[in-house]
Amino acid sequence: MTTTSGAPGARIWIEAARPRTLPAAVAPVLVGTAAAEVAPGGLSVVRFLLALTVALTLQVAVNFANDYFDGVKGVDTEARTGPRRVVAAGLVAPSAMKRAIALTLVVAALAGLALAALVGWELLLVGVAAVLATLGYSGGSRPYASAGLGEVFVFVFFGVVATVGSAYVQDGGVTMVAVLASLPMGCLATALLVVNNLRDIPSDTEVGKRTLAVRLGEPRTRLLYVVLVAVAFTGLVPLVLVTGEGWLLAPLLAIVVVWRGVELVRHAPLGPRLIAALGHTAQAQLVFALLLTASLLLTGGGR
């Protein structure tokens, strides 16, 4: 592997951050904040921005760490059909990527400390767990992404923890509405990873990376994606039953956005065409989250 002699430009770092995955960080914070048991006018903008900073920097740190560890371990090869990885492509030196990982984790830690000071020091336990999970995803001698557990990490931390946690920093409690809202967010975030791993089945198999998609095989991975999307949308029904607010079905409109992704996952061959499915899924997740956020704020669903 060769690296460029000069410092990587901003465009390279943006590419390494994988912008298409960032809705997975933004969406649950929006929904969790709206699900808090606080009147809309009583929501803390500062706490919201701090929670958003933690979520975004952890997502970027995961992406940087995955790029670094898979690059230095030789997991990312020329056979990979997805977007290029900057360390493997020689665009960023491994040492520079390590510094970038450390920097993003420091920013996440500082935002987390500020939240803990405002809300409660119990948040530090969640923060430590999130950082360890970030580094363990593809790092260490036994990365859990290669053990088929990456989807569990995404569902837990970018679904349940991010959504319920965003509500908690506003109202200091764990409510049924926040928990129920976290489930579709976790399913859609997990669907993003499933698309990514589905596309990479051939190259991951070649280098011995045993993701859940590799373990399940192509047909069952395609089915898993469809099930996750279906559960995300049907997961709105319990929210309506608990709150009695029909407006919380508004996110069903995001089906129009995700449908193209579903069709691609069901029928497109493994390879570059599935990159578009990742984009459709990310867009659908953001639209779903925006509609659910607006509906919760409109109906006072968390109150």
Image: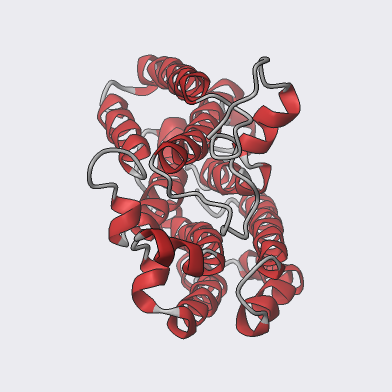
Q: Is residue 223 above or below residue 1?
A: below
Query: Is 94 displayed left or right of 89 in the figure?
Result: left
Q: Is residue 3 above or below residue 275?
A: above
Pinpoint residue 239: horizontal percent, then vertical percent: 50, 66
- State the image quarter where residue 299 is shown: bottom right
Query: Is 87 displayed left or right of 224 in the figure?
Result: right
In front: 134, or 209?
209
| Residue 221 in sight in this render | yes
Query: Is 18 displayed left or right of 68 in the figure?
Result: right
What residue sits 39% from the left and 46% below the top? 157
> Residue pushed farthest front?
2
In front: 173, or 284?
284
Q: Is residue 196 above or below residue 12?
A: below
Q: Is residue 120 above or below residue 175?
A: above
| Residue 255 in sight in this render | no
What residue sits 42% from the left and 52% below the top? 154
Pinpoint residue 73: horizontal percent, then vertical percent: 38, 42
Pinpoint residue 159: horizontal percent, then vertical percent: 44, 52
What residue sits 67% from the left and 21% below the top? 8
